[in-house]
Amino acid sequence: MPTQTAAQKRAQARVEYDAFLAECPSRQLLDRISDKWVALILAALGRDGPDHHAEPQVMRYSELSRRLAGVSQKMLTQTLRSLERDGLVTRTVTPSVPVTVTYELTDLGLSLHRLTYGIKVWAEAHMDEVHANRERYDAAVDR
């Protein structure tokens, strides 16, 4: 059997990614991007709209914290770090007094924003319907 270079092994692994398999690394990525805080951070940094011509928004940590009602400081920090690690967000530190830290979407993050924005819009548009279905279901189960 011929030996493979690291690049050949990575290329072969990419061909074999299958999220239905328990050990597939794409499962970890699906877990990350399906998190509500990830979707909301992407929406906030993407100007909360699918306009492909608009520039992504640069936001300070405090602005993000205010925009994402209910997120704890710990969760926001952890989520931003994971997004930065995955290459979806860039963090810029500007030496000033006080130090300014801003976040913005990378091209990769913007491409994901375009997908998750539709899910956010769908959830907002269909929430009344889902509530009604839940009430019908709960009433039928409680009999």
Image: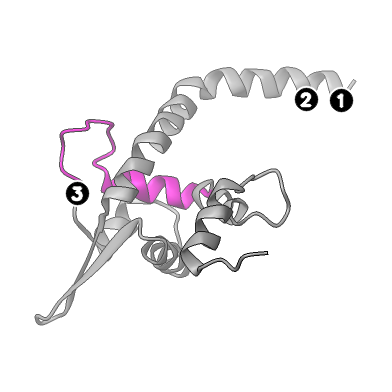
- Do the residues under discs 1 and 2 have CB atoms within 8 angstroms? yes
Q: Above or below — where is 135 with respect to 50?
A: above
Give the Cα distance between marks 3 and 1.
47 Å
Whole-percent x, y for residue 31 in the image: 58, 52
Whole-percent x, y for residue 28 in the image: 59, 56
Q: Residue at x 44, y 58 (%)?
A: 71
Upstream in sequence: badge 2 or badge 3 = 3
Q: Secondary structure at mark 3?
A: loop
Q: Is residue 28 left or right of residue 56?
A: right
State which mark lies toward you, 2 or 3: 3
State which mark lies toward you, 3 or 1: 3
Give the Cα distance between marks 1 and 2.
6 Å
Quarter of the rendering containing residue 52: top left
Instruction: Specify the segment rendered in magenta.
Output: 35-57
Whole-percent x, y for residue 23 in the image: 70, 57
**Quarter placement of the N terminus:** bottom right
Give the Cα distance between marks 2 and 3.
42 Å
Residue marked by disc 1: 142
Query: Which numbered dot is residue 57?
Result: 3
Q: Residue flagged by tag 1: what amino acid is it? A: Asp
Query: Which numbered dot is residue 138?
Result: 2
Q: Residues within 10 Å of mark 3 (few under 14, many from 20)?
A: some
Q: Residues within 10 Å of mark 2 (few under 14, many from 20)?
A: few
Look at the image and say whether residue 42 sits in the magenta stretch: yes
Q: Residue at x 33, y 49 (%)?
A: 108
